[in-house]
Image: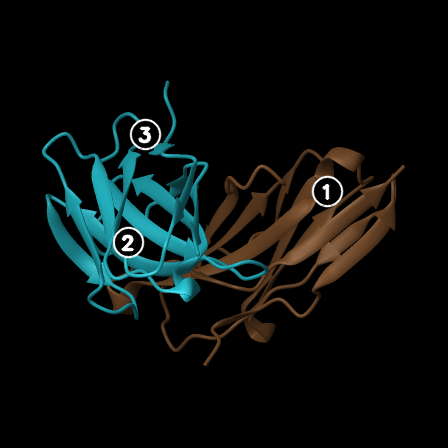
Amino acid sequence: AQKVTQAQTEISVVEKEDVTLDCVYETRDTTYYLFWYKQPPSGELVFLIRRNSFDEQNEISGRYSWNFQKSTSSFNFTITASQVVDSAVYFCALSEVSNSGYALNFGKGTSLLVTP
Amino acid sequence: DAGVTQSPTHLIKTRGQQVTLRCSPKSGHDTVSWYQQALGQGPQFIFQYYEEEERQRGNFPDRFSGHQFPNYSSELNVNALLLGDSALYLCASSLANWGSTDTQYFGPGTRLTVL
């Protein structure tokens, strides 16, 4: 069973629009970690954020913000005032401590295209 | 501060051959994980090495094997290559953190094409 679902396969926005990337996860663990990574066309996965299951505070970093809601098992990512350089594939990932806690289970990714 | 490095960048092999991919972790990291990313998919966990031993393994056949050296660098070996092994192979490094999950930092990947 897929543990991380990113229902949006592709999103296209015009520069300066806000965009939200959805991530829904599934786990029976009470302790787990959630991540977002960005993969530009070059292929390298770039780490964006790490959240543990006990910290539901939303986080803002510049134009990026994350909304973690355990009640809906969601960890959504919003880019405010998008820019062309934000074009990439974005992956949400889950790590479960009970499962040795080492493997990252990735969603299938959301491809974001920002046009001028 | 050097990040995660991988070699080679690209590789072309034929079915049945064997391949070795290499990874050097980020400075200060002691743990290396390998992932396979097929086109249009998310990365799939192959295995993780710590203290020169395989600590956890994903759902991959025994044709996939690895090694970690005393300097923490790692190799991924794939025997009897199949067409389906064509993918981007990503190496990630982290700092061992028992009972928790440290952030994994990824290298640029090795693009393997099997003909």
Please give the residue where the numbered disc 3 appears in the rendered image: B26
Q: Label 1's element?
A: loop
Q: Nearer the viewer, mark 2 or mark 3?
A: 3
Instruction: Give the crowd class for mark 1: few <14, some 14-19, many >=20 residues within 10 Å.
Output: many
Label 3: chain letter: B
Please give the residue where the numbered disc 2 appears in the rendered image: B100
Q: Label 2's element?
A: loop
Please state which amino acid type lies under the numbered disc 2.
Ser
Q: Label 3's element?
A: loop
Quarter-of-image position of residue B100: bottom left
- The front one of B98 and B87 is B87
Q: Are marks 1 and 2 on the same chain?
A: no
Instruction: Give the crowd class for mark 3: few <14, some 14-19, many >=20 residues within 10 Å.
Output: many
Q: Which mark is residue A39?
A: none
Whole-percent x, y for residue B45 in the image: 35, 60
Whole-percent x, y for residue B108 in the image: 46, 36
Please give the residue where the numbered disc 1 appears in the rendered image: A87
Whole-percent x, y for residue A115 in the image: 86, 42
**Which colour denotes chain A?**
brown
Label 1: chain letter: A
Q: Is residue B43 above or below residue B10?
A: below
- The front one of B19 and B96 is B19
